[in-house]
Amino acid sequence: METGEAHYVRRLLDALQRRPGRPVLHRPEGATTAGALAAAILSTAIGLTRAGVARGETVAVLTEPNVPAMLVTRYAAHLLGATVTHVRSMNARADGEHLSTLARLRVLRATGARTLVVDAANAARGRELAATAPSLTVLAADELRRHLSGRLPSAAWNPTDIAVVDLTSGSSGDPKLVQQPFGARDTRIRVSAGDGSPDWPVTMLSVTPVSHATSTMVDAVLIGGGAVVLRDGFGLDEVVDAVVRHRVTDVYLAVPHLYQLVDRPEAARRALPSLRQVLYSGTFAAPTRIAQAVTLFGERLTQLYGSTEAGGMCTLTPLDHAEPELLPSVGRPFSWVDLDIREADCRTATPRGTIGEVWVRAATTMAGYLGDPALTAQTMHGGWLRTGDLARLDRYGYLHLVGRIGSVIKANGLKIHPSTVERVLLAHPAVADAVVYDRRDPRHGETAHAAVQLRPGVRCGATQLRDHVAAGLSPAHVPAGFSFLDKLPLTVSGKPDRVALRAAAD
């Protein structure tokens, strides 16, 4: 059933065409005005229509992560009612690590994509895919934008049609294909836009891929009349320079990025005059480190807890950050989210304060996993989505994460939650960051291993950290091994890359 509400891309085009001369996308190589972005979207939509793309088709996109061509292609395909899937990398692998040709072909087959749009940097990869998949039509993003005339179909849309097929995070396992309906996407955009207060429009900086975590945030900013600063990754000095140059008001950071700013307060302070909101998310945030961030950023901090499958679930607000006892939590559920903590039987809610699995129900959740009905049935029950996260609710309704069901390490008969050990390690004054993960030992079976990044200029050894964990938890929680790294490997979205850590340790 089609809806009478305006398509989100139509709302975007209306916003762009109101003031066409203003810059809305900022890259190091230059700016794109609102009028130029609107023209590129419409021209690309005409080009895709001529190539046979229509509602219900899937368009695969293979571009660099934070370039205008990626946004233009997605908006144009969505204007036609088509599905979009990004095949540059998983959400989210390391920035220099691309999916293999075989993995891309699997995604193309699973989604039924017959059209692939590439930018100049990925043209050779597009040709390689076309040589293996003769039915695939490869289109150059630059060429599509040259279609200056033509007739577009109406932008009516069905909220149950699939807008995006996302590849979930590959930080701890194989990716899954998450289907996000247009209705869920539209809801995510609307709730990202806030309440239409005078704080808008904003200038937002995105250093993580706008194809994933910041995707609907960027959409909301542009629809709200704001601008977006795009950077290919997080470099502390480059990020601060971008904030100062463009007077950035809002920035989204992965937790390790926030830690880097906290460790360089003299640089971070340069960004404070224009910043109104620092959003952080993606992985466990140590209370001691967040307390340091509060000292630096004050009431600018907002923590988000969410997932590809569910969207945003909870937030720790700026006012919450002023209360030290709330920093171990990820905040309270958003008003549009129903949240339960359930027992292993999936039916019984746990008593307040006890650990169970997080279940959520919201208009922002996925439609299911493409090509995997068994996993979909296991994950979704009567409108509720099982997150796989273990947590407890305190008496005030704040959510405290414990770990993942699948990431529990069973060492010497004890169930160890990596985040519990990480929390203790991060409380040590010498530790800048830490990741705990499982390793298979031929003699002892499954064991816990810790990768540690020390603060600059600080000396600390495994013995001190073993004693620290034993005192903070128990001797049984002490990792069997420690690795000390100058910098922990991160995925392009800023999450600890456990796959890379395991590979380096083996």
Image (cartoon, rainbow, N blue to C red):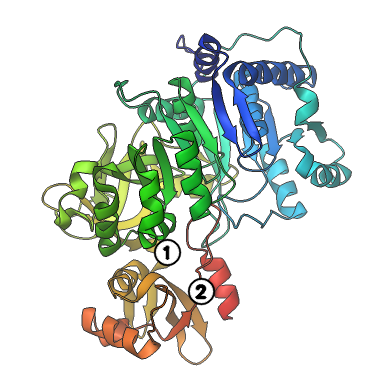
The residue where tag 1 is placed is 406
* Residue 414 screen position, x and y as percent: 31, 80
Does the rendering let one see residue 386?
no
Query: Of the residues under marks 1 and 2, which one precedes in the sequence?
Result: 1
Which residue is more in the foreground, 12 or 113? 12
Residue type at numbered disc 1: Gly
**458 vs 371: above or below:** below
Occupied quadrant, residue 293: bottom left
Residue type at numbered disc 2: Asp
* Residue 82 screen position, x and y as percent: 63, 25
Which residue is more in the foreground, 291 or 245? 245
Label 1, secondary structure: give it.
helix
What residue is drawn where x is 16% and y is 46%?
397
The residue where tag 2 is placed is 486
What residue is drawn where x is 30% and y is 44%?
302
Other-residue count near label 1 (Cα within 10 Å), few / some / many at <14 / 14–19 / ≥20: few
User: Disc 1 or disc 2, which is closer to the eye?
Assistant: 2
